[in-house]
Image (tube, rainbow, N blue to C red):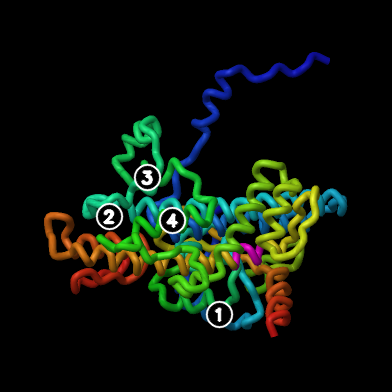
Amino acid sequence: MAVKERARYAISAAQLGSWLRNQGPDSWWSVDGDPVLTGRIAFPAPGPEIADVLVKMKKRLLFLDLEEEGHVRRAGGGERVLQFSWEEYPQTDWLLIEDMETAENSKKLATNHE
Amino acid sequence: MAKVPVPSSHYFHDLPKHAVAVAPEAAVPVQHYGRYANDSWNLLLYIERNLKRTNVYQAAYERHMHRLHSMVLLNLVEAFERFLKEVASFCVDNVASAVIDDRLDVFAIKGQVAAVHFQEQSVGKALCESSTWLDCDEITRRFLRILAAPNDPNKGSFYLFPLSTQNSASLRNKGELVALLFQLRHSIVHNAGVITRSDAVKLSRFAKQQIEAPRVFWPERADVWYVKLFLDDLVETINNEIAMGLTDLTALYASDQSIFVPAERSQLLADCFQKSITIAGTACDPSS
């Protein structure tokens, strides 16, 4: 069911950016279904890189209010999945998905470059 | 049991109509690439995420995921080719009304091909969309001519995939890696993923090591990500370099208002390349 049809919060893009930054530089994320962010950022990307873009956006988000801890769903592999829509485009839901395997691969890539 | 009949020809005639609207980002090449490349990557994540919830036969899972890796890698290369085509088409449309030299002769196009593109009302699309953009030397030759300064005795100085002594420096050493990806694309598309002996000869050259054949290309998840990292970065660099090259060329004609109005042309370029563009002192930022 769409975010707009369920219990939800409205937050600013900057608040999401702040949350992503708090997850640390080693957490990687992908966005599925949102042309606004996928046109500006090459995903998967580390949280702080996405945060840098979000804090400059004067947009607001609808954020699905889940009963799970911190309103974050965990997928089968333990990765966090958050469901949003932009307040101005409530008909289009999109997902912010943690990419744990890419986080691991990025560490290997960094180690190989040292 | 009766054999299931083959669908009638009507089904196949209707097949091309099973389509959806092109994404709005298609008007901006760099965003079109970003959307398609990210969507392709997300396909991989979606399958992974949902299969982890179920019991799977590990061997079958791994076999199918490797095949999916190939498909996603192919999509990334196709998105890159599409990006080159769209940017080239935009450049051609921008120079076609200004230049009177032979630069557009770099495209070999037959009358019938031009005719089917007639409704596009875009000479860029007519010239660029009918060709493949999968040969680095040919791609370089096309952009060299499209972006050449008028009356340049060398017929251009913008090399998309430059040699070590050519400009631009930010694009050096990329051509061989792109050629390697184009060759892998060839194996996936034309040989169902089999690296034939002739593929291996070319791949060995690009990879600077012996590649065995016949073998089935079997990429890992990390391989797909590394290709995406490379192409994402390359697309951004090419977008920047072509924006500069086309801006410089356009500026040469800015004094002749019968060709274009500088403010309008600056905006057009800014919107296409998603960058601030200044032509004849008129600076424009992307509209959105």
Query: What's the CA distance linking mark 2 and mark 1?
Result: 40 Å
B100 lies above or below A8: above
Q: Which residue is mark 2?
A: B95
The structure residue drawn at horizontal position 51% and vertical position 52%, both measured from the top left corner, is B81
Circle 4 crowding by C-alpha within 10 Å: few under 14, some 14–19, many from 20: some
Q: Quadrant of residue B15 in the image?
A: top right
Magenta region: B224-229
Q: What kind of residue is marked 4?
A: Arg
Q: Chain of mark 3?
A: B
Q: Which residue is mark 3?
A: B125
Q: Are marks 4 and 1 on the same chain?
A: no
Q: Quick one: which residue is furthest to the top in this view?
A: B2
Q: Regarding mark 3 in the picture, which secondary structure is present there?
A: helix
Q: Are marks 2 and 1 on the same chain?
A: no
- Viewer-closest of A50 and B235: B235
Residue B137 horizontal/vertical position (percent): 51, 56
- Viewer-closest of B61 and B182: B182
The image quadrant where one finds the C terminus of chain A is bottom right
Give the side of residue B91 with respect to residue B168, left or right: left
Q: What kind of residue is marked 3?
A: Lys
**Residues marked 3 and 1 touching at CB (< 8 Å):** no
The structure residue drawn at horizontal position 55% and vertical position 67%, both measured from the top left corner, is B174
**Residues marked 2 and 1 touching at CB (< 8 Å):** no
Query: What's the CA distance linking mark 4 and mark 3?
Result: 18 Å
Residue B80 horizontal/vertical position (percent): 52, 56
Q: Chain of mark 1?
A: A
Q: What kind of residue is marked 1?
A: Pro
Residue B142 horizontal/vertical position (percent): 41, 54
Give the side of residue A98 with respect to residue A39, left or right: right
> Would residue A66 be counted in the magenta stretch?
no
Q: Which of marks 2 and 3 precedes in the sequence?
A: 2
